Amino acid sequence: MISLNFKASLDFLGAPVYNAFLERSLKAFDTLVSGSGAGNDFLGWLNLPSDMLNSSILAEIEEVKERWYKMGVDTVVSIGIGGSYLGAAAAIKALSPSFHKEGTPEEPEVLFAGNNLSEDYLYELLEYIKEKNVGVVVISKSGTTTEPAVTFRILKSYMEQRYGLERAKELIVAITDARKGALKGLSEKMGYKTFVIPDNVGGRFSVLTPVGLLPIALAGFDIKRMLEGAADMQRACAIREADNGAIQYAAVRNALYSCGKKIEILANYNPKLQLFGEWWKQLYGESEGKEGKGIFPAAVSNTTDLHSMGQFIQQAERNLMEVVLNVREAEHTVTIESSKDDSDGLNYLAGRRVEEVNANAFEGTLMAHVDGLVPNTVIEIDHLDEYSLGELFYFFEFACGVSGYLLGVNPFDQPGVEFYKKNMFKLLGKPGYQK
């Protein structure tokens, strides 16, 4: 189980302030679990880990994986934007080797597209997959979201021209609405294998549905183990008590917000967690940033960003709070050797593991930031594996629901996202948007 340390934040806040927000957080917990709050038609994620473990969906995912293995698929293009790709991308980045290796039918390379409108990106993707055996996963509830829809139109044509219509149908899987939408209609017409995005699960909460699980499984990782970690966290988060970590985290961050800490930084000390920060940013930014309220979510990867953002965090305007993700155990061992001339002055580290240096950088940075009036919360996991990622995904989702209600907003809508789309459609001349 993950562990949480709020001491530095509690020292900053003081007991009276924290206890007041803890009481409010418990009430927000009640609103969430009772389904009595705004957006309560999007609470399907609450029991999702245990529901998924007891469903037939894992077997269906395994069937796709086995079929594509027999067809020699070594590269999967997953098409989606926002919550339709960030969770899977975060998990695959966290679990994969740091340096690229060629995909194989046993462990295909998973590429992500449809998350931007860069012509160069799409052209280079098409060039890259020319020598690959390709499968496509397209993820969209409606099938009309511009970025993935444009990308899928182009990739669908590519697959049909390259493989022929019949084989292309076997190499395309759609994850979409159960009953309606352009992608649902096309899937039925073409005969694509489809998975359902549940109506009551919003995109940014969908990583533990087929939206995230299928690409993660195709990349060769154990999604059952990930769901087991999430299910254990589901049970832990469901307990109404003051030492429930999700309730505490929601209370701490909102208490700090009330004290002028308007920006929350998620820091890590393992570059494999960089994309996890991107997933977290969408989860909290889209859930809480509305009605003139919200804590701005940012992310840094240390120690790299200590040499770029470190100065700002240490001495800029004191409107920052910090959450640090720490992995206790590295998966590999690299030891620093002694040098005869010691020209770099590092012989004092001879015989020590690089991870020991990293751990001391982590501790030293925490001390410096606390001294610099940046209160922090530390969240630790033992290993960077499927189980721990499942825990983290569910923990942050549950805490986000509590935190949104504590803040006084609907955590499950995103009305502001539509504004850029309307302007873009008008500029492009889409029928019905000229005015």
Image (cartoon, rainbow, N blue to C red):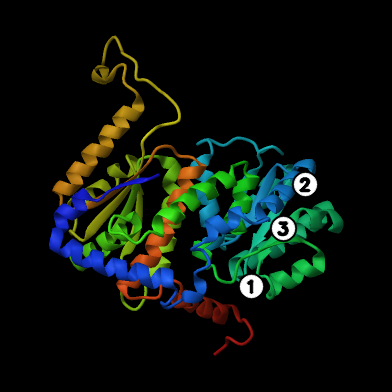
Q: Residue furthest top?
A: 340
Q: Which residue is mark 1?
A: 142
Residue 120 visible within the image: no
Q: Is residue 410 above or below residue 246?
A: below
Front in this rendered view, residue 22 or 358:
22
Marks 3 and 2 sit apart, C-alpha to C-alpha, by 12 Å
Marks 2 and 1 sit apart, C-alpha to C-alpha, by 27 Å
Q: Is residue 65 above or below residue 52?
A: above
**First along the sequence among labels 3 and 1:** 1
**First along the sequence among labels 3 and 2:** 2
Give the quarter of the image for residue 18. bottom left
Q: Which residue is mark 3?
A: 173
Residue density around tag 1, few if under 14, some if 14–19, many if 20 or more, within 10 Å: some
Residue 96 visible within the image: yes
Marks 3 and 1 sit apart, C-alpha to C-alpha, by 15 Å
Residue type, numbered disc 2: Arg
- Please tell me which residue is depicted at 18% across the width and 58% down the height of the picture: 318
Give the quarter of the image for residue 339. top left
| Element type where label 3 sits in the image | strand
